[in-house]
Amino acid sequence: MAREVCLIVNPRAGGGRAASRLPAVEAALRARGCPFRVERTTSIDHARALARGARDAGEVAAAMGGDGLMGAVAGELRGTDGVLGVLPGGRGNDWARKLGIADDAETAVEIIANGTERTVDVAVAGDRTYLGIASAGIDSDVQVIANATRLPLGGLVYVYGTLRALARWKPARWTVTVDGETHTFTGYSVAVANSGVFGGGMLLVPDASIEDGLLDIVLGGGVSKPRYLMLLAKVFNGTHVHDPSLTLLTGREVSFYADRPFVAYADGDPIAELPATFRVVPAALRVLAP
């Protein structure tokens, strides 16, 4: 029996990319005999309400947009029988990338119709759920720039943001507590990863698992700006993890702050002002995957 689907679409995602793909997605669902309805979001709160409605109706909540929309819908489904469907439509599409969902409508709809349900971990900051990576420091500055630009850069918007943010960056002093053990360092950033992928394909933690009940923490220590750029280039293939300036940890709960104010971003959206605490919620989300 075909799954009933609620398409939760952010028409502004990816500079209108989700809206332009919607007719192809609708056609592919019809071709597979999937009953569906379309709901266009007007805000993140509206998206959350739509996700609750789909969950309560027993429909697949198929999020069509960027990673921020995926995280918002996942937050309403976690810990329930609700099922998340993933239809890439944003700039980064890192959650789809982690699940192995190709960036085209036909393949994504096939998974909605005939994919396998996986039960995966999510991460939370307070009452906010995220799927990818929460980070603060230079990453905060990068995200502000990326969100503000109107240049048609796609996933490369994060590289553009990094180059601009690095020009005025000054190191911060960090205090990070992982499962009760405290670490201090001076450097660029702290990242708390669920999926390990962000920024349009940056493999910050290449081996991160979304089924191990753990968060992966990356402490970005102090290096020169030219070396930081060299590391950035390596993030796309994951070879940066061998650099001694980085410290990689795992844990179930992470708290951190810096010697100046930062806002942590996750899945492209602000999620918490520092100091903040992040934790993993194991096996909390049902999602359709290849």
Image (cartoon, rainbow, N blue to C red):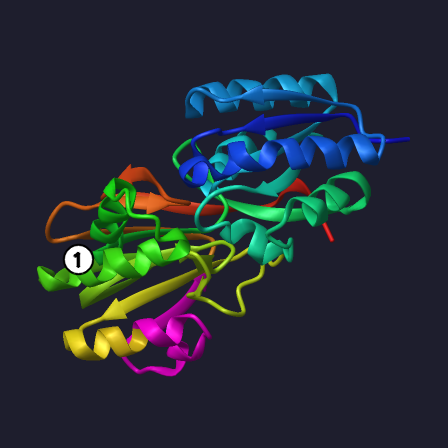
Residue 122: x, y in percent? Answer: 54, 45
Residue 36 appears in view: yes
The amino acid beneath tag 1 is Ala
Q: Determine if the magenta segment contains residue 69.
A: no
Depth check: 214 or 142 in front? 142
**Residue 240, x across and y down, in percent:** 38, 77
Q: Name the residue: 30% across, 82% down.
A: 244
**Residue 146 vs residue 283: left or right?**
left
Is residue 245 toward the left or the right of residue 249 in the image? Answer: left
Q: Position of residue 184 (x, y in %)?
A: 21, 65
**What residue is shown with label 1?**
165
- Residue 9 lies in quadrant: top right
Can residue 247 be found in the magenta stretch? yes
Q: What residue do we see at 39% from left, 71% from top? A: 235
Crowding at dot 1, Cα within 10 Å, few <14 / some 14-19 / many 20+, comes out as some
Check the picture and name the quadrant holding the N terminus: top right
218 versus 126 height, above or below: below
Chain part drawn in magenta: 232-250
Which structural element holds mark 1? helix
Left or right: where 139 falls relative to 285: left
Instruction: Pick whichever, 284 or 37, lies toward us.
Output: 37
Front residue (pair 39, 73): 39
- Asked whether residue 78 is in view, the answer is no
Q: Position of residue 21 (x, y in %)?
A: 58, 37
As displayed, is residue 149 above or below residue 217? Answer: above
Quadrant of the rendered image containing residue 8: top right
- Taking the image as shown, residue 65 lies to the left or right of residue 166, namely right
